Image (cartoon, rainbow, N blue to C red):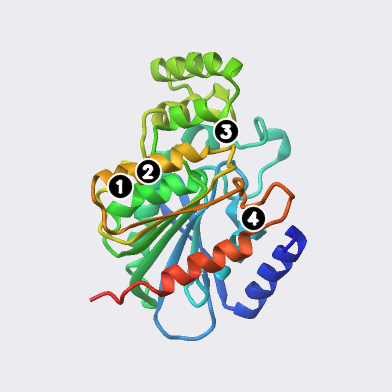
Amino acid sequence: MSLPAFLLAAAALMQAGGGDSRTQRIERPDGSQLTYHVDRPPGRQRRGVLLLFQGSGCEPVERDTRVLGYGRMLAPGRVIVTIEKYGSAGAADAAALVDGCTPDFWRGNTLSRRVLDAVAVVGALRRQGWWNGDIVLFGGSEGGAVAAMAAPLVPETRAVIVYSSGVGVSVGALVRSAIPAFAQAEADRVFAEARRNPDPERRWGGASHAWWADAIDQVPARSLLRTRAPILLVHGSRDESAPVATARATRDLMTQARAANFTYREYEGYDHFMTDAAGVDHRPEVFAAMRQWLRRLPQRR
């Protein structure tokens, strides 16, 4: 299916789902507003949640029209919950943006902050009468790292799906493996500077030095060892953003730990976006396979 056809199919699923999309806010310990969105299918029955983590960048998840489409394709019938990154929510004067993002985004957005925000949102969901206490975590690219790191911190986790995310090595090693050899010395210099001074005013590679200082040495897959929930890792062999070796490292880590709750699916010839060398988009079939994996999970006791 071509990309336009894929987006049309996703839009149709979203429209068919109808539902109640609401924006909610809670306060972080620093006084800033944590914004999250709840998209509920019609009906009053209690439902499970799909907590969907966006990839990198500062685009508000509310404006990312693909996200709900992905959620509806993956888990129709679940309530889709998405979380705005620190500083990404709300309209901002273009003149006030710095490198396309708000100063608050550069100051406050880190992997660890995204994980803490996820835990806070789940805490808020526990007070919602419509939630049945069942939650699936899904994330792609950077969002896959967030899903992996959040999994052991959310006891209600029903399953974890990590998609096109090289979580099996440190973030620093992942970046070095994805950039040309001539740029690796620059990366090493930036990483050393960020460790010494995590200055949010300094940026490299689309992230602040504060983000890099927090992320460089994180190996998100290690968190997966601490959850008993079923885990699915999906990756393309032709992925250049997160080279397949970084996903195989997760497979090897889980195999060495004899983790019976782990499933690895590698798609030959597909890239970071599940597109083959001829430009054919295979996301619909990949998402269908993930949906079937979810459906085949045994019922929780």
In the depicted structure, whether residue 158 falls above or below residue 183: below
Q: Amino acid at mark 1?
A: Met
Q: CA distance from mark 3 to mark 2?
A: 34 Å
Q: CA distance from mark 2 to mark 1?
A: 6 Å
Q: Are marks 2 and 4 in contact (CB under 8 Å)?
A: no
**Does label 3 or label 2 sit earlier along the sequence?**
3
Q: Of 205 and 40, which appears nearest the observer?
A: 205
Q: In the visual, does 13 lie left or right of 157? A: right
In the depicted structure, whether residue 209 falls above or below residue 9: above
Secondary structure of the residue carrying numbered label 2: helix
Q: At 45% from the left edge and 38% from the top edge, which residue is drawn?
A: 246
Q: Quadrant of residue 180?
A: top right
Q: Are marks 2 and 1 in contact (CB under 8 Å)?
A: yes
Mark linked to residue 250? 2
Residue at the disc numbered 4: 64
Secondary structure of the residue carrying numbered label 4: loop
